[in-house]
Amino acid sequence: MKIKIEFDEHMQEEEIIIRCSSLTEKIQKIQRTLSEIDNTKEKIILFKNETEYYLNLEDILFFETGLHGIEAHTIDNIFQCKFKLYELEEILPGSFMRISKSAILNTNKVYSINRNLTASSVIEFKNTHKQVYVSRNYFKPLKNKLEEKR
């Protein structure tokens, strides 16, 4: 694999081009990694009462269906989100993934998984009491994604 960097002082925005003979798993992994790096500072608009908050996506632990719609959980707060879960799945970067019918997880924030073979497993986060459940159907894809990150 050759890596080439070209400088152009007239460019308005950086551009990365990957040239390959076929779309292999390795190329897809490179693409996902570059996308995650590019999206680390993305913001999302969330609400609490009548106030709008502009949060970095990296501050979100998980999104979950709550009593009044979709809730975004941070270490110490819960915000309301205007998007549906299926819409979030489409717009969130690769570090987020669906872990149940009612939750999307920021895989960068996982501290531990308390595995339960017969039911949902519990995901815990550092510096907070918050937990979220990963259903059996999503457990293996989650483990694979976490292994990829190591």
Image (cartoon, rainbow, N blue to C red):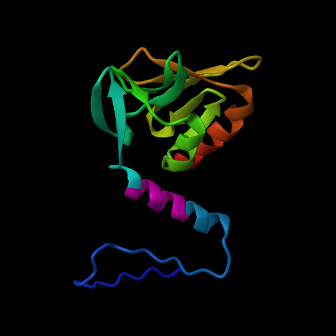
Q: Residue furthest front?
A: 50
Horizontally, residue 124 falls left or right of residue 119, namely left
Q: Quadrant of residue 46?
A: top left
Q: Residue at x 58, y 29 (%)?
A: 103
**Magenta span: chief secondary structure:** helix
Q: Quadrant of the N terminus?
A: bottom right
Relative image position of residue 3 (x, y in whole percent): 45, 79
Q: Is residue 78 magenta?
A: no
Q: Residue at x 57, y 40 (%)?
A: 97
Residue 120 position (above or below residue 43) = above
Relative image position of residue 115 (x, y in whole percent): 65, 21
Q: Residue furthest left?
A: 9
Q: Nearer the viewer, residue 92 or 17?
A: 92
Residue 116 position (above or below residue 21) = above
Q: Residue at x 52, y 41 (%)?
A: 88
- Segment tinted magenta in the rendering: 30-38
How many marks can you see?
A: 0
Horizontally, residue 13 falls left or right of residue 126, namely left
Q: Residue at x 43, y 74 (%)?
A: 16
Relative image position of residue 34 (x, y in whole percent): 45, 62
Q: Nearer the viewer, residue 8 or 127?
A: 8
Relative image position of residue 63 (x, y in whole percent): 50, 30
Q: Nearer the viewer, residue 103 or 113?
A: 103
Q: Quadrant of residue 65?
A: top right
Q: Is residue 37 magenta?
A: yes
Q: Nearer the viewer, residue 10 or 137?
A: 10
Residue 6 position (above or below residue 57) = below
